[in-house]
Image (cartoon, helix red, strand yellow):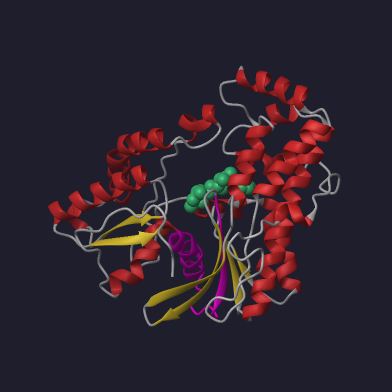
Amino acid sequence: MRSGEQVVSNVVASQFATHQPYGGIVPELASREHLRAILPVVRQALSEAGKSYAAVDALAVTQGPGLAGSLLVGISYAKALTFALEKPLIAVNHLEGHIHAVLLEERQKGHRELALPVLALVVSGGHTHLYLVERQGELWSYRNVGHTRDDAAGEAFDKVAKLLALGFPGGPTIDRLSGHGDGRAVKFAPSQMKHPDRKTRGRQVEVGGGRRFDFSYSGIKTAVLRYVETHQLLPSIEARRQAVASLAGPRIEDYLANCDQPTLDLIASFQQAVVEDLIEKTLAAAREYQVAGLFVTGGVAANNQLRERFDREAASAGFPVYFPSRPLSTDNAAMIAAAAYPKLLARQFAPVEFSADASMALG
Ligand code: KG4
Ligand code: ZN
């Protein structure tokens, strides 16, 4: 990345094919694939940028949160490279990266003076977090005002997709199949979207003088399972599992051809319930904290219905809403470089002894 704004190259190595047969990420396989990919990916990024290692001013790497094994591969490699090249190293929080994907693209559109604070919904396979985002000089600050108490929204998409034999990752498939079903067909009770916090018995605790807006998506996953059992959908799931197992790379048309209407209605209703819950809580937090705008970012921000409804409902609530482009919604390196740039300007470099932090908090 040049000047915190121009993406000179952005190489993404996907591991989905490796994890697909297991219906979820297998940590050991993930670190092995990282190890395999890291050298060729960095070489390709430099070659697409037409740059040598020596021409780089600084390197940035993700410190956490994430799978420790995968984080360590990146950190060890980045440390070795910066040591050999005598360049500074910047440690970045993955969630901060998702927020900077939005800031980066707004700068690219010439929108440099965003009104602050903004409320950022970071919604991915591992997180459903709300942050108040502000700026202090060069550096950005984040305050968490909500998080999931159990499953992340993307995790719920993936687990429901696994249950319904829709492949992995489930989000993009559920997104596209939902257009073929009736989102009002299956009603999920609001209690299925709430999980009482054991420590506070469900009260929205005040922390640092502000209300919290927590999420919970494990209940709806169980509700989908109950629905499948009580509506005798298991035989059709099994038939679909066998039909797509014989295909090398099942496409959306293959899933569609193997889904009956009750299944499509269930898929659409699940997605609608999650989308409505995300929007409702985010807008409630936006009103509470009187923010100037909203960011919606992370893998699930690629979801079509989430984007359309957020656009509409945030506009009618008086909040401008910003999304990253779809390629920058899911994990990528450009967002990590974008988050690192203000730290480079502030010369906030990582100490040599820093290590992976699998559950790293932001703010
Ligand atoms: O941010 P990301 O690429 O990786 C993590 O940091 O977790 O997010 C991946 C998650 C997966 O759970 C995937 O199913 C979900 O984002 N996802 C979607 C869509 N595209 C990706 N969920 C719903 N609709 C989509 N179109
Ligand atoms: Zn992510």
Q: Position of residue 55 (x, y in %)?
A: 20, 57
User: Left of 276 or right of it: where is 285?
Assistant: left
Please give the count of numbered marks on the rendered protein.
0
User: Left of 67 or right of it: where is 163?
Assistant: right
Q: Position of residue 3 (x, y in %)?
A: 34, 68
What residue is drawn where x is 68% and y is 56%?
306
What residue is drawn where x is 65% and y is 74%?
286
Q: Position of residue 278 (x, y in %)?
A: 67, 60
Residue 105 on the magenta segment: yes
Query: Could you say which quadrant of the image residue 64 lies in?
Result: bottom left
Q: Position of residue 151 (x, y in %)?
A: 59, 50
Q: Specify start and end residues of the magenta stretch as a single range.
A: 95-124
Taking depth in this image into account, of 115 and 164 the one nearest to the observer is 164
Residue 330 visible: no
Query: Could you say which quadrant of the image residue 261 lies in?
Result: top right
Residue 105 visible: yes
Viewport quadrant of the C terminus: bottom left
- The correct choice, above or below, for 135 with respect to 326 in the image is below
Viewport quadrant of the N terminus: bottom left
Taking depth in this image into account, of 173 and 125 the one nearest to the observer is 125
What residue is drawn where x is 60% and y is 41%?
158
